[in-house]
Amino acid sequence: MSFSSDVKEELSKINNLTRKNEIKYELLGYFISKNTSVINEKIIRYTTESEYNINRFSKLLKNLDINHSIGIEGKNFVISFKKSEIIDVDNIEIKNFSELIKFENENIEIKIQEKKLNEFEKKAIIRGTFLGAGSINNPENKYHLEINLSNVVNLHYIENLLIEFYINIKKLEQENKNSIYLKDGEEIAKFLALLGANKAVLEFEDIRVKKGMNGKVNRLVNCQTANLNKTINASVEQIEAIRKLQKENKFSKLDDNLKEIALLRLEYPDASLIELGQKLSSTLGKSGVNYRLKKIIELANE
């Protein structure tokens, strides 16, 4: 299974089905997701490829005694129920969504103010939207979590809820797509924890730590490789200059300090400047060795 499926499986098993208000608000999250629509102003329809999503949605509906049917269309699972099951339901307050939503064309739009909800109800709405039409990439490949909402009003509502929980989101507002997405690993971990996907958080953070360590190792290797290449290229230039001086019978005219460093370079072509300096009869620092070798190159080019 994909990492996204694992997360949804975990969320679908969260045992809050005895708390009616949380059930109601998690359903509300499903209702305002991209995958829920209203057909002929009478039928509410939810579509998904995820078996976990459809099972969770069905359990929530059953818990509020909302009559519904489940079907399959191609690769998709479909839940359908009458609009009258949740609107203007007499004497059954928990089933009545009249004060929470309104219908805009084929979409369900949230209308309750955030300040009227407690922390658990807000989390339930966010969890419902993610289960309803959300996804998360395998963190081993890249960090990306996305929730698709049915319209821009619902997008802004969820955006404000996430801001309350100090989660920095990005958003996409287009005619046919209204999405909230996260691309930062730390923000995604906070989001998963907010939903209650504790197992997924541990797995995600474990992968994130390993990726961070691998990144540091790669940067170190790249740095060392670059330094080694620089040393090799400089050494080749220095040796060529020394050979040229020898060929042109100019080597014997060098002073003793230049002769000593030149002979060491020929003997230790892979040595760094620091290593060469330590092998001199009188130890010399990196800058001093570099000065002498540059002087040899200058003399060879005259």
Image (tube, helix red, strand yellow):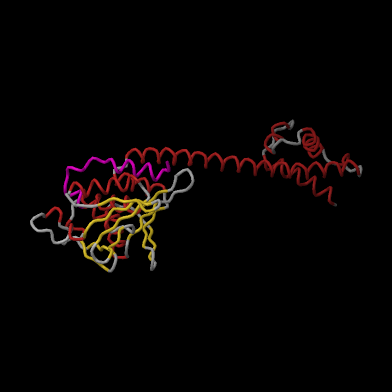
Quarter of the image that includes the N terminus: top left
- Answer with the quarter of the image where residue 180 lies: bottom left
Q: Residue at x 72, y 31 (%)?
A: 279
Extent of the magenta region = 1-24
| Image position of 239 (left or right of 147) | right
Task: Give the camera-side residue of 185 and 176.
Answer: 176
Q: Is 89 included in the stretch rendered in magenta?
A: no
**Residue 113 in the image: x percent, y percent?**
20, 61
Is 93 situated left or right of 160 in this image? left
> Residue at (19%, 52%) from the top-left corner?
66
Residue shown at 26%/41% (left/top)? 14
Q: Nearer the viewer, residue 290 or 100?
A: 100
Among all residues in the image, which is located at the extreme left?
A: 91
Q: Residue at x 32, y 64 (%)?
A: 151
> Could you tell me residue 22's position as x and y percent?
20, 48
Q: Position of residue 90 (x, y in %)?
A: 9, 58
Residue 148 position within the rendered picture, expressed as x and y whole percent measured from the top left? 36, 58
Question: Is 105 positioned to the left or the right of 94 in the image?
Answer: right
Q: How many marks?
A: 0
Residue 33 higher or lower than 259, as above or below: below
Q: Is residue 21 magenta?
A: yes
Dominant secondary-structure state across the stretch colored magenta? helix
Front position in the image: 270 or 59? 59
